[in-house]
Image (cartoon, rainbow, N blue to C red):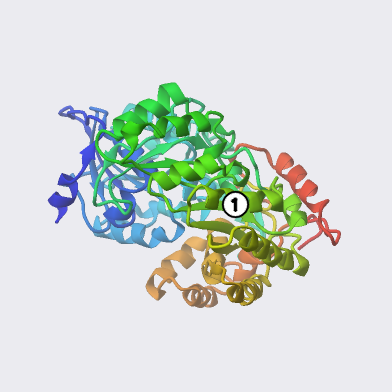
C-alpha cells in the first residue's frame, strides 16, 4: 500500500542527496495521506526540508509512511485542523514518545509543530510540543534548522534555550503561566529566566514569490491538482476573521516572476489548476492572470478558485470558469444586513450581491454558494430577517441559478478585534430559524454544525489547562458530549465550558496568547473593537466591566 501511494507522486522539485551525517527528521501530517498531501502548507514545508542535504526527511501520515529512522532527532507536525490533536497523540504513542514534553528525555526527538492552528493559539496544545513555529515558514524553517545544528550535540535543555532565541520560535516549557485560581483567569505569563524573550513575535514573510504545489498526485483528496497561492492574507479585515488579521499584511504574488512560471511548471504534469488565497480576485493583476489562463493552449485545463470577493464577480470571470469546467462560485457575504456588515467592516452592499448572481448566471455558471454567519456581536433579530429578504431578492434576480447559503456560528478567534466576545447562546436557534424560512423558498441552506463551533471556540480561546481535558476527551470520542463529560470530571481543576466559550472577556484581562504577538498590537485591536461597537443598535456595555 505504502509504496504505491508514494510511487504515484510527480515531484516538482529535486530532493537532495543527504550527507552521511544528515539529521534524521520525521515530518508528519496528523491525518490520512489523501488529506495531508492536499495541504499546500505541508507540501511546501516537506519540499523545503527535503531539498537540504543536511537533513534526511521521512514522511508520516496516520495510514502510510516512508521508511522511518530508528533514532529521529526531530519530529515535526503540520497542524491545520484543531481536532487532529487526537491523531498527534496516536502517532506519538505509536512512535513510543511520551505525550507531554516534560516527560521526554535525551533519547527522544524534539517535537515541533507549526501551521495555522498553532500559529493562532498554541496554548491548549502547548504541553505536547517542545517547539512551536509561529507564522510563515519561508524564513523560519531555515532559521530553526540552522540554530538546531549549532547545538545538535548538546543536551535537551541547552537545545531548547538556544532555539528560544530565534525570532518566531516558541518553547512553551520556558514560560510559566500563573492563575488567580485553578478555575479562574490568568494572572501572569512570564519567561522562566531573563535570557528567554518575554514575548515571541509571529514571523511574516514579505517576498513576492508565494507557495505553489511541490507534488501532484491522483491519490490526493483533490486529485491531480496543482495549487498556486495567488495572495496571502486579505485586505478587507472583517473583524472576526483570523485569515485576515493573523496573516497581515496583504501580499500578492508577482504575476511575471512567480505566478506564470509556477502555472507553466504545474500544467506540464496535470490539467487541474487551483488558485488559492483568502481573496484571490483582489490580486491587482487578476484580469491579466485570467487572460493568461484563457489562452487556447490551456483549453483542457480545469480551474478552481478558492473564494472570491463579491464585487469582482464579472461575466468574464464566470465565463472563464464555466469554460474551464467549474460550475459553481463561492462568495462570502456574512449577512444580508447592511448594519451588521458595518459592524464587521464588510464593505459590501446587497445590490453588489445581486449583481454577482446575475453575472454568474450570464457567464454560464449553474450555481452560486454564499457564506453567512449567525451570532456576530451586535446581531439582532431584524438582521436575520434581512438575510432572508436578501436571499429572496438574489433568487428573484437570477432565476434557475442554484443558490446555496452555507452558514456558520460566530467563533471568537485570537488576534482579531472580536477575540473578547464569547459565542452567542442564541446562535443555534438562529440557524434553525434561517433553515425554516429559506427551505420553502427553494434555497439550499447548509448550516455548519453548532456543536462543532462550540468545540472550535473552546480550542481557539483555550489556555494550557485544557491539556488535561484533551487527554481525557480522546478516550471519550470527539462529540460535544465528550467534552462536557471531561469538564465534569475536571470540575474545580480548570474553568468551566462557559468561561472559555460563552463568556465575554474583559479587555483588561491577560489572554492565553498575550505573550505571543500577532501582526497588530492589542491597542489597535481594541480601537477596531470600539469602531465595531459604535455601529451596534443597542449601545454595548464596555468589555472592561464585563466579568
| Rendering coords of residue 451 (x, y %) | 53, 71
Image quadrant containing the C terminus: bottom right
Q: Is residue 222 above or below residue 204?
A: below
Is residue 342 shown to the viewer in this render?
A: yes
Residue in front for this viewpoint, 353 or 9: 353
Q: Left or right: where does residue 195 sit relative to residue 537?
A: left
Image quadrant containing the N terminus: bottom left
Residue in front for this viewpoint, 492 or 143: 143
Q: Left or right: where does residue 71 sit relative to residue 381?
A: left
- Give residue 347's quadrant in the image: top right
According to the picture, the residue beneath numbered tag 1 turns out to be 358
Q: Is residue 273 above or below residue 144?
A: below
- Give residue 15's quadrant in the image: top left
| Rendering coords of residue 259 (x, y %) | 41, 29
Q: Secondary structure at mark 1?
A: helix
| Rendering coords of residue 326 (x, y %) | 41, 50
| Residue at image location 43% in from the left, 29% down from the top | 139
| Rendering coords of residue 475 (x, y %) | 38, 73
Residue in front for this viewpoint, 382 or 211: 382
| Residue at image location 37% in from the left, 29% down from the top | 142
Q: Residue furthest top?
A: 257
| Residue at image location 76% in from the left, 69% down from the top | 381
Q: Is residue 352 above or below residue 489?
A: above
Amino acid at each position: 500500500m505504502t509504496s504505491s501511494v508514494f510511487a504515484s507522486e510527480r515531484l516538482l522539485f529535486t530532493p537532495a542527496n543527504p550527507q552521511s551525517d544528515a539529521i534524521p527528521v520525521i515530518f508528519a501530517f496528523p491525518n490520512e495521506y489523501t488529506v495531508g498531501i492536499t495541504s499546500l502548507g505541508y507540501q511546501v514545508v516537506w519540499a523545503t526540508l527535503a531539498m537540504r542535504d543536511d537533513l534526511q526527511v521521512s514522511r508520516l501520515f496516520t495510514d502510510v509512511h516512508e521508511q522511518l529512522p530508528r533514532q529521529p532527532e526531530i519530529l515535526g507536525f503540520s497542524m491545520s485542523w484543531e481536532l487532529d490533536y487526537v491523531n498527534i497523540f496516536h502517532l506519538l504513542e505509536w512512535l513510543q514518545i511520551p505525550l507531554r514534553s516534560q516527560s521526554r528525555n535525551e533519547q527522544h526527538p524534539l517535537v515541533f509543530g507549526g501551521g495555522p492552528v498553532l500559529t493562532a493559539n498554541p496554548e491548549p496544545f502547548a504541553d505536547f510540543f517542545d517547539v512551536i513555529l509561529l507564522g510563515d515558514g519561508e524564513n523560519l524553517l531555515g532559521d530553526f534548522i540552522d540554530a538546531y545544528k549549532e547545538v545538535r550535540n548538546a543536551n535537551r535543555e541547552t537545545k531548547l534555550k538556544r532555539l528560544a532565541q530565534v525570532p518566531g520560535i516558541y518553547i512553551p516549557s520556558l514560560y510559566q503561566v500563573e492563575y488567580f485560581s485553578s478555575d479562574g483567569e490568568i494572572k501572569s505569563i512570564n519567561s522562566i529566566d531573563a535570557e528567554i524573550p518575554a514575548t515571541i513575535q509571529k514571523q511574516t514573510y514579505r517576498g513576492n514569490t508565494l507557495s505553489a504545489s511541490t507534488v501532484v498526485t491522483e491519490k490526493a483528496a483533490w486529485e491531480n491538482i496543482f495549487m498556486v497561492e495567488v495572495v496571502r492574507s486579505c485586505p478587507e479585515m472583517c473583524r472576526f476573521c483570523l485569515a485576515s488579521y493573523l496573516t497581515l499584511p496583504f501580499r500578492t504574488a508577482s504575476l511575471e516572476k512567480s505566478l506564470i512560471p509556477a502555472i507553466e511548471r504545474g500544467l506540464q504534469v496535470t490539467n487541474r489548476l487551483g488558485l488559492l488565497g483568502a481573496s484571490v480576485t483582489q490580486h491587482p493583476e487578476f484580469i491579466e492572470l485570467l487572460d493568461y489562463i484563457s489562452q487556447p493552449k490551456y483549453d483542457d485545463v480545469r480551474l478552481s478558485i478558492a473564494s472570491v470577493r463579491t464585487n469582482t464577480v464579472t461575466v468574464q470571470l464566470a465565463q472563464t470558469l464555466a469554460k474551464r469546467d467549474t460550475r459553481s462560485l463561492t462568495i462570502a457575504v456574512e449577512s444580508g444586513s447592511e448594519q451588521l456588515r458595518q459592524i464587521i467592516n464588510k464593505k459590501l452592499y446587497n445590490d453588489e450581491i445581486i449583481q454577482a448572481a446575475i453575472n454568474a448566471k450570464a457567464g454560464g455558471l449553474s450555481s452560486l454558494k454564499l457564506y453567512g454567519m449567525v451570532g456576530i456581536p451586535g446581531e439582532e433579530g431584524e438582521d436575520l430577517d434581512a438575510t432572508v429578504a436578501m436571499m429572496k431578492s438574489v433568487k428573484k434576480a437570477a432565476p434557475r441559478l442554484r443558490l446555496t447559503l452555507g452558514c456558520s456560528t460566530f467563533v471568537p478567534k485570537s488576534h482579531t478585534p472580536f477575540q473578547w466576545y464569547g459565542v452567542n447562546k442564541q446562535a443555534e436557534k438562529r440557524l434553525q430559524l434561517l433553515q425554516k424560512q429559506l427551505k420553502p423558498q427553494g434555497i439550499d441552506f447548509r448550516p455548519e454544525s453548532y456543536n462543532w463551533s462550540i468545540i472550535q471556540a473552546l480550542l481557539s480561546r483555550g489556555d494550557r489547562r485544557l491539556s488535561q481535558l484533551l487527554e481525557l476527551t480522546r478516550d471519550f470520542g470527539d462529540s460535544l458530549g465528550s467534552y462536557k463529560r471531561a469538564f465534569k470530571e475536571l470540575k474545580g481543576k480548570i474553568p468551566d465550558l462557559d468561561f472559555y466559550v460563552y463568556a465575554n472577556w474583559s479587555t483588561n484581562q491577560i489572554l492565553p496568547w498575550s505573550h505571543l504577538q500577532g501582526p497588530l498590537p492589542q491597542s489597535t485591536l481594541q480601537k477596531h473593537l470600539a469602531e465595531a461597537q459604535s455601529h451596534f443598535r443597542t449601545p454595548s456595555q464596555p468589555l472592561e466591566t464585563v466579568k
